[in-house]
Amino acid sequence: MFRMIHQNFNVLDLKQSLTFYQTALGLHEVRRRETPDFTLVYLADDSEAFQLELTWLKDRTTPYNLGDEEFHLAFATDDLQAAHNLHAQMGCICYENPEMGIYFIKDPDGYWLEIVPQK
């Protein structure tokens, strides 16, 4: 039996990424691991069933190559309009599909995050 526990995103600016994920998606830090070379920060929503691991390589100075950006994480919200208003105000909406009732936001490193209504 297996259970998914986390997804990793490498980030260039840990402080900026933490602020983004806390503001845009309400995620909070659940644990952290510090080493001289890197920091791992695990974020979760209130359920803490799945975590987003942010990895900050301290000597990294260039943005990550995300290829064709053909992957994303999805987040459900019980108030799509309020979420959309927040993300529009933040200027992070990168794609909208009104016919499907979804949209995507982009984090500071260019990772796409899908926002869907709670079903």
Image: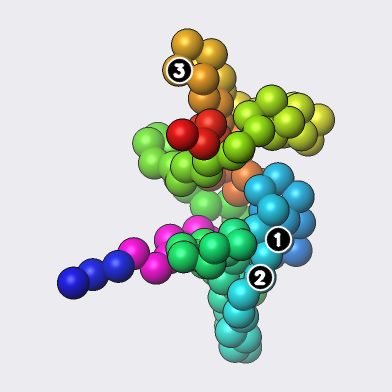
Foreground residue, 39 or 79?
79
Answer with mark 2 or mark 1, whichever residue precedes in sequence: 1
Horizontal side of residue 116 vs 91, given as left or right: left
Image quarter (top left, top right, bottom left or bottom right) of the N terminus: bottom left
Q: Is residue 3 magenta?
A: no
- Whether residue 36 is visible here, answered yes or no, is yes
- Are the residues at dot 2 and dot 1 in contact (C-beta closer than 8 Å)? yes
Q: Which residue is mark 3?
A: 100
> Where are the magenta residues, as a range?
4-11
**Residue to which mark 1 is pinned:** 18
- Of labels 2 and 3, earlier in sequence is 2
Q: Is residue 42 above or below residue 46?
A: below
Q: Position of residue 9 (x, y in %)?
A: 50, 59
Q: Characterize the local packing of mark 2: few (<14), some (14-19) or many (20 or more) Cα atoms within 10 angstroms.
A: some
Q: Nearer the viewer, residue 20 or 4?
A: 4
Res 45 quadrant in image: bottom right
Return the residue nearer the eye: 36 or 43: 43
Residue 100 as seen in the image, left or right of residue 86: left
Q: Residue furthest left?
A: 1
Distance CA(mark 3)–CA(mark 1)? 29 Å
Q: Which mark is on residue 29?
A: 2
Say which amino acid is labelled 2: Glu
Residue at image point 69% right, 53% down: 26
What's the residue at 37%, 36% (across, down)? 70
Report, in whole angstroms, how far the alpha carbon at label 2 lies from the one at label 1.
8 Å
The numbered mark, 3 or 1, whose residue comes first in the sequence reads 1
Residue type for callout 1: Leu
Find numbered disc 1 in the image and state the secondary structure of the residue it sits on: helix
